[in-house]
Image (tube, rainbow, N blue to C red):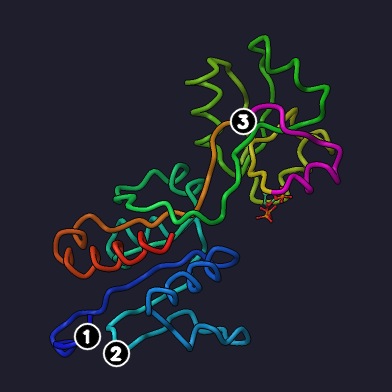
Amino acid sequence: MEGHTKDMRYLTFALGKGRLADQTLALLEKIGITCEEMKDKGSRKLIFVNEALKLRFFLAKGSDVPTYVEYGAADIGVVGSDTILEENRRVYEVLDLGFGRCRMCVCGPASAKELLQHHEMIRVASKYPKIAKEYFYNQKHQTVDIIKLNGSVELGPIVGLSDVIVDIVETGSTLKENGLEVLEEICPLSARMIVNQVSMKMEAERIKKILQALKDNV
Ligand code: PRP
């Protein structure tokens, strides 16, 4: 990848902050892409450069990663497929990175199970209103009232805001500790790599090299 780096433009990666970012950096390191600066946990810096490889990395809120990639502010992004489905941006989804595996589910108290059987008008709380709507309206043909929340969605049925929730289940311990369970499974999820549609053509060679190296390692 090195050589005529002088003439190269930076390839920019947008990484979702948090759990996925650490695993993404570990994977990139395996294929020889390192960014030492980014490992400093105490730092509040948001953007990091690897001069030798002409790469830039920034950390963004996960739900903003597809936006940066669609507009070309980042060439490449790494984000959960939950966010890709919810944001529905014009980007190419190029690779399942194999980590961050979890499930999008309808959850609630066991007593809510029957509310899902008879097309009842129920309340559904979720951080993912589009995924919830697509599932209930287009797959189950059940008209529901969707309430958007921004986190700690499990509170919904506990405090009486909603009958059920649509949320990510990984280990299931959050549900268990709050007396809730998986009622229906919507889809499996994992970390994905996305690419800007113009970058995919203009920087095809560099991007394909990275993709191939990643494919050999996932
Ligand atoms: C996610 C998700 C669940 C939990 C699932 O929340 O929304 O609450 O993790 O994980 P588990 O099945 O292993 O318990 P997150 O930690 O991202 O925080 P949030 O509730 O603020 O969205």
Bounds of the magenta segment: 171-185
Residue 192 location, quadrant = bottom left
Q: Mark 3 is on which residue type?
A: Glu
Image quadrant holding the C terminus, namely bottom left
Residue drawn at x 56%, y 41% as measured from the top left: 128
Using the image, determine if residue 205 lies above or below residue 52. Answer: above
Residue drawn at x 38%, y 57% as measured from the top left: 193
Q: Position of residue 145 (x, y in %)?
A: 62, 26
Q: Position of residue 194 (x, y in %)?
A: 35, 56
User: Along the horizontal axis of the image, is 199 left or right of 151?
Assistant: left
Residue drawn at x 58%, y 16% as measured from the top left: 142
Residues marked 3 and 2 touching at CB (< 8 Å): no
First along the sequence among labels 2 and 1: 1
Q: Where is residue 89 in the image (x, y as percent from the top left)?
A: 35, 47
Residue 108 location, quadrant = top right
Q: Rounded to the nearest whole Å, what is the CA distance between mark 3 and mark 2?
A: 45 Å
Residue lying at the far front in this picture: please name it: 216
Using the image, determine if residue 81 lies above or below residue 145. Answer: below
User: Along the horizontal axis of the image, is 163 left or right of 192?
Assistant: right
Using the image, determine if residue 54 lies above or below residue 155. Answer: below
First along the sequence among labels 3 and 2: 2
User: Along the horizontal axis of the image, is 62 left or right of 202?
Assistant: right
The residue that mark 3 highlights is 185
The residue that mark 2 highlights is 52
Image quadrant holding the N terminus, namely bottom left
Check disc 1 and report its element: helix, strand or loop. Answer: loop
Using the image, determine if residue 15 lies above or below residue 180. Answer: below
Check disc 3 and report its element: helix, strand or loop. Answer: strand
The residue carrying pointer 1 sits among few (fewer than 14), some (14 to 19) or many (20 or more) residues within 10 Å by Cα, namely few
